[in-house]
């Protein structure tokens, strides 16, 4: 295992018996935190011997086995050493662990699906094999309970982590989120018309209030096909201020995007900052606010330009610019992290608000604890 700070979450395995979708990193995190060990009687996959888990081990953030310093009791013998976790039992050989001396300390191979392929290391058998498939009822219950929590899954640990560690994690999440936004345009930077259409649709979508964004996206597609749109589009307006009505936002979006239609991509590359100013100036006649212009920069313009422009210095400038743009923090996210003092409004810079939303969605809700700096700080402290 090489669990670097920017390691990617592995593809989840959908277990055929339970229908539960889990990832290897999730299993590692659950095991390391004894989340389903205390009330469970495990049995060895091959000989059925009861296993007593005395120490699940600690997560290894370097090369080698997933967990170190574990202790398991089997047939009256205490086994001390490392643990390797896989989705499939055959992954032991697929990952070439059998001939890797870094895995000579492994006492237990833990896997989701057994395949009768006992792991060996340097011509010796590993003493303990554990298939987790039969324990997925407990795992599913644990996951269901965790998803009901309106707080990070690492509470109360999250309350003890310093502001600096939180901000380091959010800087990491911010970069990942920025690249996620860029990928919406990255396939089309060589196709002038396709790139411009994706940017225009993105701008229209972001101009809509949350429950009208899909309608704005469809209206943009209509507008691009002959520069007209379906005036009967079912925009929602109940409880909204007149300035947020769909008909008003469509007029703003039309004016805002006209300069983009009138310029070639080659000219955009040389004058991308001027293009944004031109769009904003054009839409002022429809009373487009500065806060909305900042939002469009954050979620459409800068990621779009990053995918279009290949110069490293320019890309570095675009990302630093993106990081500095503040955004409002949704009430739901404020409530989710509300008990964490380090993330209170007076301590968390507004330019990290978008990163905190991504932290909730991409890490906490997905249980990617093993990849989070908070968890690593806890284990390494």
Image: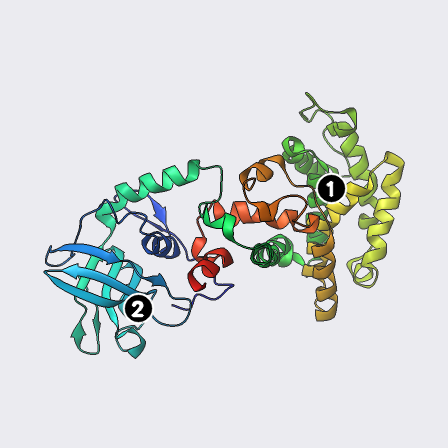
Where does label 2 land, which residue?
Answer: 94
Name the spot of residue 114 as percent of width and height, x first.
Answer: 21, 56
Quarter of the image for the C terminus: give it.
bottom left
Viewer-closest of 206 and 374: 374
- Report crowding for label 1: few under 14, some 14 to 19, many 20 or more residues within 10 A (C-alpha): some
Relative to 259, say whether 108 is above or below. below
Residue at (22% x, 56% y) in the render:
53
Q: For residue 224, which numbered disc appears in the image? A: 1
- Along the viewing direction, whichever of 243 and 151 lies nearer the viewer: 151
The image quadrant that residue 140 belongs to is top left
> Does residue 176 appear left or right of residue 69 in this picture?
right
Expressed as whole percent of the image width and height from the top left, the position of residue 117 reads 19, 64
Q: Quadrant of the N terminus?
A: bottom left
Position of residue 212 relative to residue 80, above or below, is above
User: In screen coordinates, is 103 left or right of 196?
Assistant: left
> Is residue 89 among what the camera can see?
no
Q: In the rendering, at what x and y percent does residue 346 appear?
A: 68, 45
- Nearer to us in this view, 355 or 255: 355
Q: Residue at x 71, y 39 (%)?
A: 220
């Amino acid at each position: 295992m090489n669990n670097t700070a920017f390691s990617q979450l592995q593809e989840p395995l959908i277990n055929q018996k339970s229908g539960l979708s889990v990832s290897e990193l999730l299993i590692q995190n659950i095991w390391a935190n004894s989340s389903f060990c205390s009330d469970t009687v495990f049995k060895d996959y091959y000989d059925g011997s009861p296993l007593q888990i005395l120490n699940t081990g600690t997560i290894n953030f370097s090369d080698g086995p997933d967990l170190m310093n574990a202790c398991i009791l089997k047939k009256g013998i205490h086994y001390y050493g490392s643990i390797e976790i896989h989705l499939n039992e055959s992954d032991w050989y697929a990952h070439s662990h059998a001939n890797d001396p870094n895995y000579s300390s492994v006492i237990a191979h833990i896997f989701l699906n057994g395949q009768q392929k006992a792991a060996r290391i340097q011509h010796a058998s590993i003493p303990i094999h554990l298939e987790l498939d039969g324990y997925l009822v407990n795992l599913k219950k644990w996951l269901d309970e965790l998803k009901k929590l309106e707080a990070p899954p690492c509470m109360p640990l999250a309350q003890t982590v310093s502001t600096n560690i939180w901000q380091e994690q959010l800087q990491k999440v911010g970069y990942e989120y920025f690249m996620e936004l860029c990928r919406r345009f990255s396939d089309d930077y060589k196709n002038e018309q396709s790139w411009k259409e994706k940017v225009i649709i993105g701008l229209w979508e972001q101009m809509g209030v949350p429950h009208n964004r899909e309608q704005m996206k469809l209206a943009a597609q209509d507008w691009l096909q002959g520069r007209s749109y379906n005036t009967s589009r079912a925009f929602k307006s109940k409880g909204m201020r007149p300035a947020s009505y769909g008909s008003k936002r469509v007029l703003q979006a039309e004016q805002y995007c006209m300069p983009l239609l009138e310029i070639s991509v080659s000219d955009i590359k040389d004058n991308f900052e001027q293009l944004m100013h031109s769009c904003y100036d054009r839409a002022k006649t429809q009373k487009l606010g500065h806060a909305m212009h900042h939002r469009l920069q954050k979620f459409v313009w800068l990621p779009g330009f990053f995918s279009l422009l290949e110069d490293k210095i320019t890309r570095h400038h675009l990302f630093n610019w993106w990081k500095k743009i503040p955004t409002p923090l949704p009430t739901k996210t404020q409530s989710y992290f509300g008990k964490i003092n380090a993330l209170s409004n007076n301590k968390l810079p507004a330019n990290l608000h978008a990163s905190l939303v991504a932290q909730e969605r991409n890490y906490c809700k997905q249980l990617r604890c093993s990849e989070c700096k908070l968890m690593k700080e806890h284990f390494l402290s």
